[in-house]
Amino acid sequence: MSDDSFIREVSEELRQDQAKALWDRYGPFILGVAVLVVLATAGVVGWNYWTQTQASRSGDAFSEALNFASEGQDDEALAALEKLEQDGYGAYPVLARLRAATVMAEKGDYDGAVAAFDAVAGDGSVPGSIRDMARLRAALLLVDHGGYDEVSARVEPLTADTNALRHSAREALGLAAWKEGKPTDALKLFDQIAEDTAAPRNAQERAKLLVELIRGSGDAS
């Protein structure tokens, strides 16, 4: 055996001895980490599958409720939405509450609809933007089925210049004011909408028309 061959064999033996020593020392730890990685990966995959399945089921249930509502089967729609409120996943329970309130209004149950919207608006677990929308929806119903004070109590905070819903909130409050014999207050609100360059065009056009009607009536000072 040449010197080179002997040296290679000795080096190989040393490497094997070192590898065996390292494995004896760290092998169980490495195996433990590998098992944890496999379990974590399986957990993530399982969780993603479960959430996707739940969301898909809730989406199907919501679509079924919407179909009932569109076909005029209000009682069936309300029953499906109530079940979704209890058993739904993700954002669907809140969407079901909002849609149920709309169905109540379509049935002519305005008190029930306002109460349902108010319940969403007062629920601290619901995102603020959705709570504001629920306040606005209740106020819009109360324009025709309530009084100015009831509308104001819900949308007055939404009329601030920084609020994204200010145009609709001002319109609801303006209509309620005009209905209740407060043309000057109504005119101020409609002027704000008409002069707001950020307001949607249709909202501006409605506001300008209402401004002309109020001024033309001669009631506003």
Image (cartoon, rainbow, N blue to C red):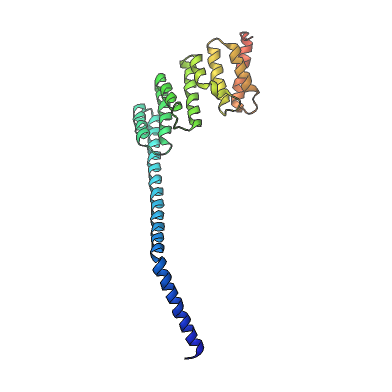
Quadrant containing the C terminus is: top right
The relative height of residue 65 versus residue 48 in the rendered view (above or below) is above
Whether residue 208 is visible: no
Q: Is residue 51 left or right of residue 189?
A: left
Please report the residue visible at 59 percent of the width from the left and 26 percent of the height from the top.
Answer: 202
**Residue at the location (41% across, 63% down)?**
30
Q: Nearer the viewer, residue 43 or 134?
A: 43
x%, y% of residue 20?
41, 73
Q: Quadrant of residue 173?
A: top right
Specify whether 69 is left or right of 4. Answer: left
Instruction: Give the x, y percent position of residue 187.
Output: 61, 15
Q: Nearer the viewer, residue 207 or 30?
A: 30
Q: Is residue 182 left or right of residue 135?
A: right
Tell me: residue 135, above or below residue 92. above
For residue 125, which quarter of the picture?
top left
Q: Residue at x 52, y 22 (%)?
A: 155
Could you tell me which residue is drawn at 45 percent across and 78 percent down?
Answer: 14
Residue 99, horizontal then vertical, whole percent: 42, 29
User: Where is residue 88 shown, x and y percent of the image?
Assistant: 37, 37
Tell me if I can see residue 68 in this picture.
yes
Position above or below: 215 against 41: above
Between 68 and 95, the one lying in front of the other is 95
